Amino acid sequence: MQLTIAKNELLKQVENLYLEAFPASERKPFAMLEEMQRQGLAEILSMVDDQGTFLGLAIVMRRGDLALLDYLAVAPEGRGRGVGSETIRQLARRFAGSRLLIEIELPDPQAENNPQRLRRKQFYLRAGFCPMEIHISLAGVAMELLSLGGAVSWEEYYRLQVELIGPERVQKMLNLHRLDA
């Protein structure tokens, strides 16, 4: 399996999976992600197998030594094949020397998808991510931050978001604030 910058047909497949895998309330406009990639602020990556079959996507935002794994999704053709784990391993190599962050939904026994939330958290913990003990509200969803490669403070995370998309978008698009402050 290979993780590469998505171009041409693979970029279309990434966009289709992105639109299918993430709720509208949690998605940034795909054109905005493409512009951020052109500016060197993001990488839109595709995972393909040795035959060139599209298996999944990873969209990473980056500033300085912080890399935010903003979106990760495995295509139906890649599920149950270790694609997610291999993608994380390749991202860890690709961003070696950086602190790789993710935002995941907080486990909540009242949530309908709580079993999925728990499985997702266990997946990232097995991959080496550590909880930052920072809980946030992101687009109205209660989330927590996990990091691979070193601790990240709330201030660093917030500054990363502001530097990437600007203070107005952080408030209007993400409605980002800390829950446990």
Image (cartoon, rainbow, N blue to C red):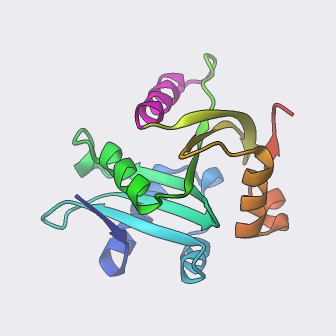
Q: Nearer the viewer, residue 98 or 161?
A: 98
Say how many tags the image has: 0
Q: Which residues are magenta?
A: 111-127
**Outermost left residue:** 51
Membership of 115 in magenta stretch: yes
Residue 171's x, y, as percent? 83, 57
**Residue depicted at x 18% and y 67%:** 52
Picture layout, residue 25 above or below residue 140: below
Residue at 41% over, 62% down: 94
Nearer to us in this view, 75 or 71: 71
* Left-right relation of 59 to 105: left
Quadrant holding the C terminus: top right
Q: Quadrant of residue 166?
A: bottom right
Q: Residue at x 32, y 52 (%)?
A: 75
Q: Quadrant of residue 62?
A: bottom right
Q: Is residue 38 magenta?
A: no
Q: In this orientation, which residue lies closer to the viewer: 88 or 32?
A: 88
Q: Is residue 150 left or right of residue 52?
A: right
| Lateral position of residue 56 relative to residue 99, left or right | left
Using the rendered image of the protein, determine whether residue 175 is visible from the camera's viewpoint: no
Q: Position of residue 50 (x, y in %)?
A: 14, 63
Q: Residue furthest top?
A: 109
Location of residue 115 in the rendering, given as x and y in whole percent from the top left corner: 48, 22
Q: Quadrant of the N terminus?
A: bottom left
Q: Is residue 32 left or right of residue 129?
A: right
Whether residue 131 is visible: yes
Q: Residue at x 73, y 34 (%)?
A: 135
